[in-house]
Amino acid sequence: MQHLWTRTTCYFDCQHALNYFYLVMKKFTEILFLCCTILLSWNGFGQSGQPNILFIISDDHALQTIDAYGEAYGITPHIDRIAREGVIFNNAFVTNSICAPSRAVLLTGKYSHKNGHKDNMSRFDAAQDVFPARLQEVGYQTAWIGKWHLQSYPQGFHYWHILPGQGYYYNPDFISMEGDTSRIQGYCTDIITDLTLEWLENRQQDQPFCLVVGEKATHRTWMPDLQDLGRFDEVAFPLPENFWDDYTGRQAAQKQNMTISETLRIGYDLKIDAHTGFGSDNYTRFTPEQQEKWDAYYEKVEKAFKEKKLSGKALVQWKYQRYMQDYLSTAVSLDRNIGKILDYLDAQGLTQNTIVIYTSDQGFYMGEHGWFDKRFMYEESMRMPFVMRYPGKVKPGSEINELVMNIDFAPTLLEAAGATIPEAIQGKSVLPLLEEAKIQWREAVYYHYYEYPGEHQVMPHFGIRTQDYKLIRFYGEGDFWELYDLQQDPGEMNNLYGKPAYEKITLTLKEGLKALIRQYEDHEAMDLLSEAKP
Ligand code: CA
């Protein structure tokens, strides 16, 4: 009996051990399976360390309307999310504040004088060395969808589908890689998202991707999506402090043609007398259903406007309110659509292995100095929004105050992808800024704007900006300097050039400017500098 008992106990012990072994193995297999699933869902990130890249570049989106940069209008939750889950660059600048040249800088990592694309009128030589072609060499699948605006066709991309020129907000045409142009019904920002998600869905899943989404929003003439019409009707926007700027001491600012009072058009920009003033192609592209909803809103705006019989400052203030309403309503759709793309990444398990960058091709004036548009080296247009999410590399909620530029995008993405950064690239990868607390970094940025007279008669100029000061040299029809103390005068209202007590800083900045011009090999500026009045 005892023998039986012992045998039985032994049997149960062995069975127990086997069961235990089986359970351990089962758990181990489950963990192994889970690890494999995670690795596979990382689409190469875990295996090769190459992250996917989603680069969203909007058009004319003013940093001062984005909440991540300080309390604004509460309409950018998804851009704010990128910042919150990643890093915000508080001092990010363009080299030349204008649409197409800025895209050329993004593609090449070089200043306009090096990539040859100085203004909106010229054609970008897309056959030159562009960063997506380098990404292809290290195994990336590359694509550009949406606004391109460089006159030539994209190169360095496996896939592209672009708006011709500026494109339209409603029922826009798109050019395919085969060269066909076809009209797609709907609202431009939504369509760009649809094309983006379609491409992501059909991409080669075994390769990392770099996808650039070129948004048309928030470019003039700020046509909101139908669902966003009237969104800000009840808001009274306060005028910026320097809205009534009289441009004392600033000759180029006196000469420009980009004011809300004179330049912003009641018909073309603010949609009054839509059938005649705003009319043109924008209006005739509507479907009858779209037109009905559009008219229902803007005819109401028009009626109220005509009843008021405004003039003088009251008229200018009305224009400002309408400008803000249309611009921000257009921006609402932009952010909503960025949200849709982020949601897709979440749903597909791509969030963890995808770098997401949101930026705009430059900043924009929201009534500061009484202006809309861009071009000037002043803060509102020289600064660009730049937020980046890079899980595993960037600590959520990081802030960088060092001076970064749009020439830095290309080298940053090349470094992240493990590609070699060509020597001719003039920017620097920003990744070391995120890894090391103390790092040698640039102490000043260089800027050069060319287009003149252009659409807004902003005189050509170049200059240097440090953390504290800005020195600008205007040339062409004029030859004069401007100096600003950015800490004391962030609105850049008080030109200190030639004022007593500023001789020393002026001299230092001029030396710095010369050094940057030499470093970036801007020979034209060097010649201009040698001819400049002291
Ligand atoms: Ca632009």
Image: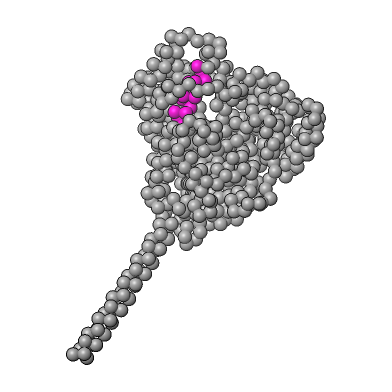
Could you tell me residue 291's position as x and y percent?
A: 36, 23
Residue visible at 45% across and 53% down in the picture: 352
Which residue is depicted at the point 39% across and 32% down? 187
Residues rendered magenta in the picture: 318-331
Residue 96 belongs to the span the image colors magenta: no
Residue 166 image point, x, y percent: 50, 31
The image quadrant where one finds the N terminus is: bottom left
Magenta segment's dominant SS is helix
Residue 317 as seen in the image, left or right of residue 424: left
Image quarter (top left, top right, bottom left or bottom right) of the C terminus: top right
What is the x, y in percent for residue 4?
A: 20, 89
Does any portion of residue 212 appear in the rendered image? Answer: no
User: Quadrant location of residue 197?
Assistant: top left
Q: Is residue 105 left or right of residue 266?
A: right
- Please say whether residue 330 is one of the residues in the magenta stretch: yes
The correct choice, above or below, for 242 with respect to 83 in the image is above
Q: Is residue 391 above or below residue 329?
A: below
Q: Position of residue 191 (x, y in %)?
A: 40, 37
Q: Residue furthest left?
A: 1
Q: Tell me which colouring the rendered structure shows.
A: one colour
For the point 77% across and 33% down, the residue is: 506
* Residue at image point 46% right, 58% down: 44
* Foreground pick, 433 / 201: 433
